[in-house]
Amino acid sequence: MNATPQLPRLQLLGGFRLAGAQGDELRLSSRKGQALLAVVALAPGQSATRAKLKALLWSDRGEDQASASLRQLLVILRKELAPLGPTVFWARNESVGLDPDALDIDVKRFMAAESAGDAAQSVASYAGLLLDGLDLGDQAFEEWLAAERGKFLNLAIGLFERHATELSGEERVAVAQRLVALDPLREASHRALISAYVANGEAALANKQFEACRTILARQLGVTPAADTEALLAKPPSRAANAKPSIAVLPFANLSDDPAQRYFSDGITADIVTELSRFHQLLVQATKGKKDDGAIGTGRELGVQYVTEGSVRRIGKRIRITVQLLDVETGQNVWAERFDADEEEIFEVQDNIVRSIASQLSDRLRIAVVEKASRKPPANLAAYECFLQADALPIGVPEAAIEARRLCRRAIDLDPDYARAHAFLASSYTLEWILHITAPDSLLDQALDVAKKAVALDERDDFCHAALARAYLYRHSYDLAEFHYLKAHSINPNNFNIIAGLGIFYGFFGEPERALSYIREALALNPHNTPTWYWRNRAVVHFLGREYEQAIEGFRRSPIQPDWVEAFLAASYAQLGKMEEARQHAVAALRLTPNLTIAAFLKKDPYRRREDAEHVAEGLRKAGFPE
């Protein structure tokens, strides 16, 4: 039996290293070359566009200079990588790539093992931080690298933790020690190591590790270990002790005399959900309402550990917010507070609520109570109210869209530096262009300009990056769209709307399985307050994946059937050969928009792959739509 031939190896985890098939190290002459190979290796299919490489590696250069620098680097890399073989590295037309069949890439092995559920192989593949020690000094690359590092580190932590529970004896201890080394401030990792020592009968080492945990938490975070951690010294560990804490935020009641102020209490609730979601170690759910058996019953039904509820009363220029945090298991009140403030203090009050809740959960979370989710608040309450009123309006209704834009422009007039108002306005331009066949392309230009300004005003705001990502996506600027979607996700990894947005992006990008995984994650995080557009866009992804029955089921969840949903239903039935149903929906779509053609329809969706666009066209053509 012939042995499997060795391949050249590219190592990115733990630092950059490139070696030939015989193990001989191959050194590159520049850090930019290392960075370029890393970006390509981590791109889908190990292929990246020249535009993406220029945007990440020469973000401070003009287009001509960046293009010249990339061409020069590619010439150098072809020469330096020649010893690995003629097919390993290639650059053709607008793309640069690596041949995954001619190169053993450690991140690819790691992800393959993770997808297969092979924790042992994943742990063996993880050698440390992605590109540890590589620093280019380019802001765009550093932001990209921080997001990628965080993704792999979080995956590794979960896999190490799971693998430790599968082992015993010294093997379990060794994996738990590596887990602590990955993130020494993570208390759950210390618990895993203490549990391993206890299970191995090494009480002295367990006590020593507990003291080490106590010292580092006190010094770095100003907190003490949780009671669960200390209890491990006396009894075997519980798997529940390592679970990520979860919290549901119930809608704050509007106690103002004016029922129309409901938008204000809803806005306060939404902002608290958003800000709590920024803590990576906490699972946050928003709900539409409270069950008959109260907050505790609602929490039990949702399967969360904590519930927050409150009320908002507005009298003149004074605002009173009451809030309480409840432990679902015990039914006890963990914390309650009343905040009285003038209008201009509302944003400080919101921040105090979030920090207070985080403080109460600090024994279960690896977060510092002084950590601040620091997107910039608006300068005044009137601008904030305009934004909340715009956000409360229904999506897809023309009259509501006009009013939302008026409110956003008013907010910007009141506070020209209000980033979120700019982002909302940009998104409204994008949505209008998407939903109206005859909408001019100038709307997309406006969307891009305003979204860029939103990010420039507050680059720490996930909402702003998501608005810019959408603007880029519908202009077919896929690399920039992906960058800003991932940036938004890195800022707030628990924001279910951004996770769903990533699903939409990868659907149009041509990766339906990856798209559905993001949308499923969004649905899991937001199961009881699911916006209609989740189902519609999941249905589009199912259609692109040739899953027509699932597509029809998703489109039928929509309470209203705009022209594009009717058209997709027609195409789905046509692809199933159900021509009577297909023609009924085609007639309905054309009744809504008589000038709807296949060409006009395809223009509104940013398919990266020509075969996806042709697949949609084929379904529409079968259903009887005009070209």
Image: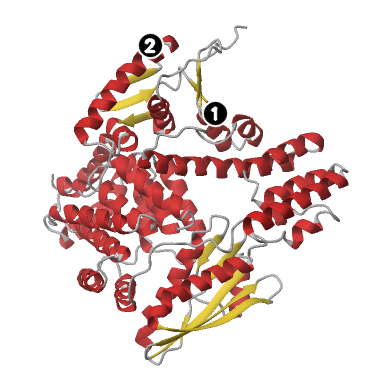
Q: Residue at x 57, y 37 (%)?
A: 114
Residue 31, position as x, y percentages in the image? 41, 27
The answer to whether marks 1 and 2 mark residues whose Cβ atoms lie closer than 8 Å is no
Element under disc 2 = loop
Asked whether residue 549 appears in the rendered view, the answer is: no
Residue 428, position as x, y percentages in the image? 24, 62
Relative to 25, say whether 216 is above or below.
Answer: below
Q: How many marks?
A: 2
Q: Would you name the residue on which mark 1 appears?
A: 109
Q: Which residue occupies the foreground of this view, 388 or 589?
A: 388
Residue 193, position as x, y percentages in the image? 75, 45
Relative to 131, say whether 398 is above or below.
Answer: below
N-term-proximal mark, 1 vs 2: 2
Q: Quadrant of residue 159?
A: top right
Q: Quadrant of residue 28?
A: top left
**10 Å neighbourhood of mark 2: few (<14), some, or many (≥20)?**
few
Type of amino acid under label 2: Pro
Residue ranking furthest to the front: 219
Q: Quadrant of residue 291?
A: bottom right
The answer to whether residue 461 is left or right of residue 441 is: right
Q: Residue at x 87, y 43 (%)?
A: 202
The answer to whether residue 308 is left or right of residue 331 is: left
Q: Would you name the residue on which mark 2 appears?
A: 86
Type of amino acid under label 1: Arg
Element under disc 1 = helix
Asked whether residue 530 appears in the rendered view, the answer is: yes
Q: Residue at x 43, y 69 (%)?
A: 271
Q: Which residue occupies the foreground of this view, 529 or 124?
A: 124
Q: How is the image coloured?
A: secondary structure
The answer to whether residue 440 is left or right of residue 612 is: left
- The residues tagged by marks 1 and 2 sit, at their Cα atoms, a distance apart of 23 Å
